[in-house]
Every structure is written in C-alpha cells, then in structure tokens.
Image: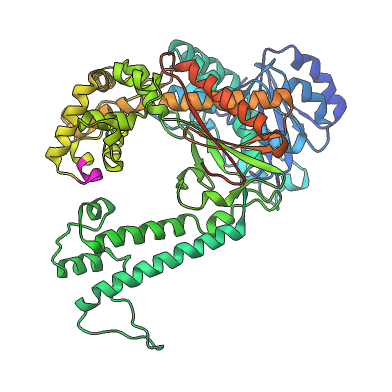
Amino acid sequence: MIAETLTDLNYKVIENTEKLREIIPELENESAIAIDTEGSRFDPFSAKLLLLQLATTKKAWVIDCAKVDLSLLKHILESTRPLKIVQNAKFDYELLKVQAEIQLGSVFDTMLAERIITCGISREISLKTIAEKYLGVKMEKSTRETFTDPHGTAARGEFTKEQLDYAAGDVLVLHEIFRKQFKTLQEENLIETAKLEFSLVPVVADMELHGSLIDEDRWRTHINELQEKRDKLNAEIQKDLRHLSPFSQVDLFGNEADTINLDSPIQLLVAFRKLGVDLPNTSEATLQKSNHSIAKKLLEYRAYEKMITAFGESILEKINPKTGRLHPDFIQLGADTGRFACNNPNLQQIPADSGFRSCFIARSGYKLITADYSQIELRIMAEVSGDTEFLQAFEKDVDLHTLTASQMFKIPISKVTKEKRFAAKSINFGLMYGRGPASLANQIGISVEEARKLLDVYFSTYKRVKQWLDNIGREAVRTGEVRTLGGRKRMFTNPDKTDPEYQRLISAIERQGKNTPIQGTSADITKYALILIHNEIKKHKLDVHLVHTVHDEIVVEARKDIVKKASKIVEDKMIEAGQKLLRRVPVKIDIHISDCWEK
C-alpha cells in the first residue's frame, strides 16, 4: 500500500455524489477508517473545505468537497463505529463542523497518542516524524502550503496530481501508525489516558469554536489605567534618582527629562551602585531580595509594563472578524504533567486579579459561570500521602493553610494572622514544586535558617507528606517515570554521572517527580469534568457552552433563565470527576455567577 517515499499510492478521486454513494456500504462495514481534510485556511470560520480523505487498510478515497454532497457521510463520521483515525483531530473536527455541519465521533488521534507515549522525553508529534518513526517513510509536507495559496490551483477548485497524492498519503499511513501506537498504549498501561484525551477532542474543539466575548472599550480603558499607573511610578523613580545626575535635562516644553531608562539593566545597575546598593543584576529574583524602596517600585513598574505589553491591543487583534469573539488554541497536552496550554492568545496567563478578567463578558441574555476546585492539589496530596492530619482537615472542611499555620507557629487557629497563613500556604503549595528553605525565605521575607526551622516543624507535623514526597522523588530517578492517579505517565532521562551538571539535573527530576503526580492528577480531574459537563449539556440540548479552562478552573456561558440549572450541572459533574480519582478526600467546588469572568 505504502512505498518508502509514498509514491505508489492506491487511491481514487471522487468528484460526484453518485461515486460517493457507491463507497458508503464499504465504509459502513469497516471497524476503523482514517480521515483527513484539506482546507484553504487554518481558521475554520473563513476556510473553504477543499478535500476530505478517507482510507481503509487497503485503499483511500480523495473527495472533492465542492462537487459532492457530504451529508451522505454524516452518519458514518458522527457515529461511534467505525473508529476515526486522525492526526490532530481537533483541526478536522472544527473544519468539518463549521463547513459541513458534521461532528466527528469516536476518534483515535495519532498526534495525541504519540504525545502520551513519549511524554517527558519527546515532543516530536508531527505526522512527518511519526510516519518515519513507525513506518520508515519519509513524507514531503511542503505541498500542504499549496492548498492555502490564494493564487494556486486549489483556490480555483482544481487539484494537481501532486496535491492529490499528498492528500491520499496523509490518510494511507494512519492505519499502520494506529496499530503500532495502540499496541504500545496497551503495553504501557496508557489506554485509559488515551481514552480520556480522545474523548476530550470534541469538547475542546467546541469550546474553541464558541470562543469568548470581550468588552473592547473596557479593555482599552483598563490598558489606559495601567499606563497611567506605570507612568506615575516611572516619574516617582526618576524623581528619586534625579539627585544622582550632575545636571538636570529639560525638554523643549520645559519638562524634566528622564534621568535613566528603566528598561536598561546597565543604567539601573549604575544607579543602584550610586545609591550604595551593589546588585549582581536587576532580575526580578534579585530585586525581590532587596529592601530598597526603588527596587520595590521598579518591580511594580515592571509588573504594569509586562501586563501592558502582554495584554494590550495585541489581544484585541485576535478577535475573529466573522464571529466577533476570541477563539484561542487550547493545547490538550501542553505540559508534560498533562495540563492544558493556551495560545493565540494565551488566556491562562491573565492574572485573576489583574482587571482584565472583568473584560471577558457574557453576551446579552447570558451569564458566565466560573467554577474551580477548592485546593484540589492539596486534596490530591492528602490522597496520595494518606497523611492523617491532611485527611482530617478536608473531612472537617477546615482551612488547611490556617490549620497548618496554627500547628507550625503553635498558636490557636483564632490567633492565625494573614501573614502567618501566607507563610503556611507558601509551604503547602511550595513543597509540590520542590521548594527549599532559601526559596521559602525569599518569598515570606525571613532568614534561610528561620525557613529551615519552619520546614522542620512542618514535616514533623505532616510526617507522611514528607515520606511520600521523598519516596516519589527517588522513584522518579530510579525508574525514570512517575504516574498520576489516573495512570498518566511522565518519563525522565537520567543524566550521565560524569556530567558536571549531574546533581542539578537529578534534583530537577526529583522536583518534577514530586510535582507531576499532583499537578497531573489535577489535570486529569479537570479533563474528566470538561467531558462530563459537555456530555450533560449535549444530552439535554441546553443553551449552555463551555468557554474556557485555566488549570483547575472551568468557565461556562449559560442563558440567564437556566443559569442555576447549568450551575448545578457544572458543580455536580466537577465533583463526580474528582471522585473518579479521589476516594478518601471530599471534593469541593467554588462557583461564581456573573456578567463577566470573575470569582
């Protein structure tokens, strides 16, 4: 079927509906078919669906979508059988849904499968790479660009043999890749993880297609407010430094010019030395260690500058002209822990307290439901460690940070201050990321020795937490892998003992080994929740839509008259998802209903 260079291909071109009708019985009898599409653009709303390719293990069909009635395939493509083998299924799902009103059902995504199989050791998941790995086939992918060329033959509905060969080749390789990947998934006990990720594909695709609505005027107003605060800080810092300059610079309008460029590390270092502060550099970590007022103002200035740069007009430019909404790219396996990543734009990097969230609004007649898991990572820590104190705190619904502060500082819960709770919170969360006494000391403003004593008290109180963390870190190094409670695997490559960076690299593996089972289990739970919510909404045909997700947070848009019903569904399904993996710890959800994205 497939030659080494994909030149001898067995496929037929279908250019009329009658020919399409003839192959339907054959497709209906298949247990699995490979699928691919070619579109004129990558944006499903403005793209034209050019070709649809289908393949069995023996042959392929390349369908000219402008010349056939694709609705004949709807029952096959939307059903659970045959299984649809797809590379990057989310793209094809979105293109087919928008341009052909077909929603792919029951997919095996070779791209996601490869990411699951190689998680932690590789990110080479393109079809070109996978085909060479499993089949020894070298695929030429440059032809793909000809489909999006507005002056090319494809734009006129005409296809060259090279384009047709390319399209057929993309599906003809998928069956054998599927066979080998499925065998590996079975051998590595990764079937459940694969099922989770494949079931999530239509959920994420629908979430992207629905998108988010932004109040553009409010967004620009907030940007202006940030700019004013940044400029005010700049003026204050310049005033504080002006005495260091031998002369005052005045512009044409009589205004005093800036003494230094706050974005110049060299100029800043010189200024700090003149102030008697000798810093090795002006990085954020270094400035945080300094108690000088200008260092603190500079950190605040940079925070404003960063937000203005990251969330300025560039975000508004991403609004789709056809829908008037943002349609970010949610990457299911963006992190090796299993967490989502988000691009174009990255909604995950928008700070919860930045003011930008309030610019994400519900459309008229709708509300936004923002729901997140309460302290889910600490609940997972309690589950995996079996620590009695942790477990009892959640069973009694006691605030774990306050309880921890009470035990660490040996004071009644009623006497725990905001500062002491913050110190306890820093330890509770920091331990999962391998935080040591130096890092803790820097965050809460105490000496390293004091931080070390706090950690000693902490671990004497939560003995099983320390035991679990130590064991899982060593296991990551010894076995080269760790798993989440859902069975997701992350692999590690140990460095050579002769490597001068050996100890640092081993420590990094230990930190990741501690963090992955916690963060990865949280990711698994959130993904189960998204699927359960999506399926329930679909089952009852509700005017409710998933909007986006940020780690353990899920945002839903619901029509006002059914928002309470939708809120109950979200809460119930998130709890159900948590209970799939947490057996000893109760799951708690915090929900907020508003006109905008807030909690």
Number of dots carrying numbers: 0
Q: From this view, report whether residue 221 is shown above or below residue 73.
A: below
Residue 337 horizontal/vertical position (percent)? 41, 29
Residue placed at 34% from the left, 18% from the top? 392
Q: What stretch is highlighted in magenta?
A: 441-445
Q: Does the magenta stretch include residue 442?
A: yes
Can residue 494 be spotted in the picture? yes
Residue 55 position, x and y percent, is: 68, 22
* x 22%, y 40%: residue: 439
**What residue sits 51% from the left and 52% below the top?**
356
Q: From this viewpoint, which residue is outermost toward the right?
A: 18
Type of secondary structure dominating the magenta stretch: helix
Q: Where is residue 142 in the image (x, y as percent from the top left)?
A: 57, 42
- x then y, percent, for residue 173: 59, 24
Q: Is 64 positioned to the left or the right of 356 in the image?
A: right
Compare residues 243 and 591 and report the one nearer the observer.
591
Quadrant of res 380: top left
> Which image quadrant: the N terminus?
top right
Q: Nearer the viewer, residue 493 or 443?
A: 443
Whether residue 4 can be seen here: no
Foreground: 473 or 506?
A: 473
Q: Does the magenta stretch include residue 529?
A: no
Q: Is residue 220 left or right of residue 409?
A: right
